Structures are given as C-alpha cells and as structure tokens.
Image (cartoon, grey):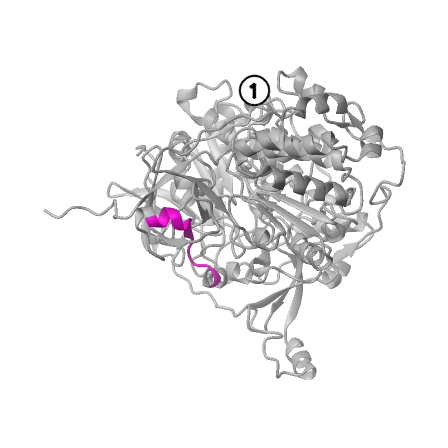
Amino acid sequence: MTTSRRKFIKISALGLGGLATTSSAFKMFGVNSYLDAAVKENIAKKFIRSATYCEVCFWKCAAWAYTDEEGSIKKIIGNEDDTHCNGRLCPRGTGGVGMYSDEDRLKTPLIRTTINGEETYREASWEEALDLIASKFKDIKEMYGPESFALLKHGSPGSHLEHLFKAYGSDTIAEPAYAQCRGPRETGFGLTFGSWVGSPEPTDIRDTKCLVLIGSHIGENMHNSQVQEMSDAIDNGATIITVDPRLSTAASKSKHWLAIKPATDIALLLSWMHVLIEEGLYNKKYVEQYTLGFDQLKQHVKPFTPEWAYGITTIKPDEIRKTARIMAAAAPSVIVHPGRHVVWYGDDSQRERAIAILNGLLGSWGNRGGFYFKESLKVPKFPHPEYPEPKWGWEEIGEKYPFAQMGITSEIVKATLKSEESEYPIKAWMVAGTNLINTLPEREKTIQAINEVEFLVVIDTMPMEITGYADVVLPECTYLERYDGIRSATNRTPSIAVRVPAVKPKYDSKPAWWISKQIGERLGLGDYFNYNDFEEVIEWQLNKLGTSLDEMKKIGVKNFERTSGPLFLEEGQEYEFYTPSGKIEFYSQQLANKGFDPMPVYTRHPEPPQGFYRLNYGRSPMHTFSRTINNPNLSDLKSENTLWVNPKVARILGLKKYQEVWLKNQDGIVSTFSIKVRITERIRWDSVYMYHGFGHNDKKLSRAFGKGVSDTELISQTVIDPIMGGTGLRGNFVSILTENPHKTSEI
C-alpha cells in the first residue's frame, strides 16, 4: 500500500451528530387503491409543490418535489410536460428524496488536523474553511501559477466551480464522465457524422423497426425516455438484437441475443458490414448521396466474412448473416445504439467508428426510426468579465491524444505524480461530486497522486472514500435544497427546466454556487459573481428566453418550437454534415493524417489466464455509480451486488448459490470484502459480472459499508485509447477465492 503524509481518515470517528427526518417516498399518492379521487385531492392540497430536475443521473428528468407543512420532502414525481421523462421517474428519481433525508450526510465543514500525533478532522465554520481554501488558491497561483490547481468534477456543481476556476486562471479541468465513460463514442461519431451523440442520445427508438444494442444495457442503466420508448417499440413489433456476453434485461426482451466473446465486438461489426455490402443490402441511395469513402470501405471489409468472425466472436455465421439481413430489411428505421459507458479495451473510438459506419450504411442517421436531428435552446450567459488566458490547461496535458475534446482525468492524475516529471505540474486539487477512489481505475496511482498534492479540497453531500483524503471537506446541500443552472438538453424539441429549493439546506450544508462565489470574492474575483443570490442569474436568463422565474416555478418545464429545421431528412434532400468533407466519412482522412487507421481494424486482446475470468460490470437500475448506495430508499431496493457465475464454472469450483467468495485479480489485488455468488446461465463461462458502485469502505456510510465488492478496486490494468485518451477498463481478470484471504491465523 502507498504510504504518505496524508492519511485516510474515516469521518465516522467524528460524531458529527444531527438527526434526519425519514420519508416514505414510495408510500404516498396512488398506493392505496381504496382512496378515492376526492380524498387524494384533499391530501395533496396540504403539500407544497416545487419545481426541480433530478440530480441522481445525467438524464436530468424534470420533476415536482412535494413538502409537507413541517417542511419535510415527502415525494418526488415526474413532470408530465417533460420530454425527458413524460411524467414518469425511474426508481432512482422517485428515491432521490433519500439523498435529502440520509442521516449520514456531511453536515459541517471539516479541516484536517493532528491531535496527539493522530490525524483527524475537526469541525470548522464556513468562514474559517473558506478563508483557508482561498489562501491556498493564492499560494498556488503565486508559487506555480493558477494552472497548477486542478478541478475534477461531476454533475451540476461542476459548472459553478468551473466558472470559479476559469475566472481564477485555470483551465485544468476534467471529469471522469469523459475519459472513463462516454468519450470514445463522441469521438467515433464525431469523426464519422461530424456530430457528438450527446445526452440524451438522439435515438428515435419509439419509431424504430430494429434496435441493436452492443453492450448497452437499456432497462438497467434506466435512461428514462429510452426505456419508455424501447417498451413502446417492443409493443409495436420492433426487433431487438442484443450483443452481450451476459443475458441482460435488454437481451431478455430481444429476439436475438448474441452472446459474444468479450473483446471481439469490432470483428462482428466488420462482418456485418461485409454482409451488407457483399449482398447489396446497404442503403444505396443514402450511401451514394451522403457518404464518402464507400469504395475504400468495400475493399476494406471484403476479407471479414461471417466465417472469419465466427472464429473470433464464437457467433455462428448463419446468425451473423441473419441479423445483418434483419437490420437491412428495417433500414433506414434501424438503430445501432452508440451506448454510454464505452471505455472497454483501448480501441474504443474505433469500435464506435465501426458502429457509426454501420449506421451510415443502413441510412439511419437523420431518418425516422433511426437518429433524429437534435435541438436544444441556448441559455444566455450571465454577464461577467472575460476569463484570463491560462498558459496551459487540459489540452496541453492531454496533447498526445489529438482527438480529445475534454480534460482527461487520468492524465491529470499522471501530471500530479512527481515521478512523471510533467511539463505541466499539478500541485492542488478540488474534487466535487465524484468519488475518485471508486471512479478511477488503478486506485493505488490515484491515492499516490492524492498524497503528493499540496492541497486537496473535496465538496460532496456524503462522506465518500475521497473525503477521507481531503485537507478540507465542504458539505454541499442536495439538489432538492438549492437553485441550479437552467437545464437545456438536446431532444426532439427544445425545452428548459428549472431547479428551485424545495426546502432550506439541511444541517450546515451549502450550494455549490454559493461556495464558488464565496471563494471567488476572497480571491478578488467579485466581478465574476455580480449577484447576491443565484436566483438573480436564473431570473435574468429566463427573462432573456421570454419567460420568468415565477412562470417556471408554476410549470417547471417550458417547451419551445424547433427552429433548426425538420427532425429528419426529406427524400433526396441536400444536407451538409459537419465533417471536413460535408459527408458521412467512412474513410477518415483526419485519422489518417494523424497516423491512425482511417477505417476500423480488429485487434486481438489478451484473454483470461487459466483459472481466471474476465471481470465485467454494469449498472443496477436502482443506483447511479457509487453515489446512491447509501440512499435509504434505494438501498432497500438493492443493498449489495452479487457475482454472476456460469453453472459450468460453479461446478468446477464447487460453488453454491449465495456462497460468499472473494476475488483476486491478475495483479494479486484481493477484494476487501466478500460477494455472494449468483449461479446463472445468463453469463458466459469465460466471464463473471457484478453491478458497479458497491464495496464502500467508509463506516460512516451506515447502509453501504462492506456491502459487496468494488469492481474499481480490482481494475488495475488499463489500455489507453490512443485517439482520445479513454481508459479501457475491461481487460482485467479475476480468480474466485472460497476462503477468506483476510482472516488472520490464530497462534
């Protein structure tokens, strides 16, 4: 283990006190069928309704929070006018009230100190904590330059803190959601169509005739409107094809489940292209009018027959041909879904390129039942001075990845390590809304970097693992207790949604906008925060958009007419894509110019050694990463993860149902906690599977501590995508231990 001056402190030892009001989020309206409408209406009148949008995941569904006469939040329901949710929230959305009521929340600022030679935290006032942080900002700027202070963030708080950092002079900003999640798909689709996929994805699932999912777990990732549309598509007779080594929820609803050998997806995609082109099934008119490089692609995929792919993927040639023909028959009303968490094997931008090219051959981009042309409303920027120009930032740190378009978290970690001798040294971190210990792979390297920074401040709602390494911990209030930026996300039609406080912040917690403003003013940056309350910013922006905060508090969501043109291409319509050629680029000259393969190529990846199994992981529909595991409402629904093991493997190892086991990876790292075995035919014999986000080791998380195994703890090998810097995470293998490896022997 890494040793350093910064010892991990379990905040559980501090006795921070305070009781929370528990709420019954699932037992209020509509549960008792014997209540008639009049009684329900009478009950509802006793509650105050506040407009909000969900913070439990990035879908940001608009909702109404209901508070009682005592000021406690009792229920959250979807806003019927919102295109992100259509009035229906997922379990995480309705259970979001648990974030507010969780008695384990951070309650007051904390400062690291030493008492009797032992490191611990002491409670501090906001004044003292903010003064200390501001002094460190000044010290870092004076000694190294503002660029040496990095912001690692996630979620709504990030935008407020990003404004602070840019005003301070630092563009050293990154978030795991890019290089550890969705980045490769944005690069792959951007190089092909000239457009990022974005969030929510512009997939016309409700009208599709064929939906192809490649490691995309719709129904488990709970991307709300997509789950609803997929249900409608199934009812309408759409064919679902799922490619996954596991029979996921989506696969169980599919007409075709292709239980692919892990790490061979590009081979299947190239083979599908071969069938479409060799059998003349591709969308000829679309390809001729809108694409570039078809002849090169035709020559490129000629050797990649289904028989060739069978030897790699274990999917039979007849099944490859059959599914390719089903896609072609449905075209252009077909979607080969780009996925969300796509950092797998290090060639992920090329795999996403292959998915994009396949959609191009089928003519799905810009056609009904395929991908629609998304639109959003641009929210005016509240006036502030120009940001100073930093000498360097995330672009320079990640310069060896020419197609990176956001900060790469793992590169910021590397630039922090003294051993790397970076040209762009990072000396301090602010971490907000992301538990880096359970988010980034190669945990030891992350902890080493944390130990080498001169100052670390963490802003969070909960005492996550990362808070135990901070010099200063600031308790952020939950999304139900604060104003935030206006939600304007891409969709079929533009819409905006507001988030207003349903209740006052609990304990001594504060919103991120207030924290940013307070630090900024201490740094002499008051002109960048020319407002007393963020409510003023929202009011100004809404007025510019032709509405008001008063109106938005009443309606929550406002929908607007499209102004960018139709959702789909018209027959024969001239259209220029945002690529250098103005065409869909099957052959990428941009990649060729940088020394990369201009078309996707299959590369063989390492396979599990004898006695090991590939570690696969995914999302539980009840949870978002590790953020919600302690949520009292959601932990009741899913309190721990299990290890999916094929019956053949279980027989060989003598495993029993629900037996507790430990995992050991290829580098000798052993899971801290045990996990129960789930024996199921729904997983290939060469792989195991678990839900992500469990295995917390902070006892202050009273419902999450020690529950299950953390997959991140076992991910010590990564392969970096050379195109955009994404961190391939699925090249790790584990063996299964039936005896407790942590048990001390008795003498």
**Magenta includes 646?**
yes
* Residue 346 position within the rendered picture, expressed as x and y whole percent measured from the top left: 53, 29
Instruction: Give the amino acid at mark 1.
Output: Lys
* Residue 296 position within the rendered picture, expressed as x and y whole percent measured from the top left: 72, 21
**Residue bounds of the magenta highlight:** 637-651
Residue 233 falls in image quadrant: bottom right
Q: What residue do we see at 77% from left, 23% from top?
A: 580
**Magenta includes 463?**
no
For residue 547, say whether it is visible: yes
* Residue 515 position within the rendered picture, expressed as x and y whole percent measured from the top left: 55, 45
Q: What residue do we see at 85% from left, 50% from top?
A: 561
SS for tag 1?
loop
**Residue 9 or residue 659, whichever sits in front:** 659
> How busy is the neighbourhood of tag 1: few (under 14 within 10 Å), some, or many (20 plus)?
few
Q: Which quadrant holds the N terminus?
A: top left
For residue 382, say whether it is visible: no
**Residue 445 or residue 664, whichever sits in front:** 664
**Residue 621 or residue 145, whichever sits in front:** 621
* Residue 209 position within the rendered picture, expressed as x and y whole percent measured from the top left: 74, 49
Residue 107 falls in image quadrant: bottom left
* 61 on left or right of 154: right
**Residue 134 or residue 694, whichever sits in front:** 694
* 29 on left or right of 628: right
Q: Is residue 68 above or below residue 16?
A: below
* 632 on left or right of 238: left
Q: Residue furthest left?
A: 747
Q: Which residue is mark 1?
A: 400
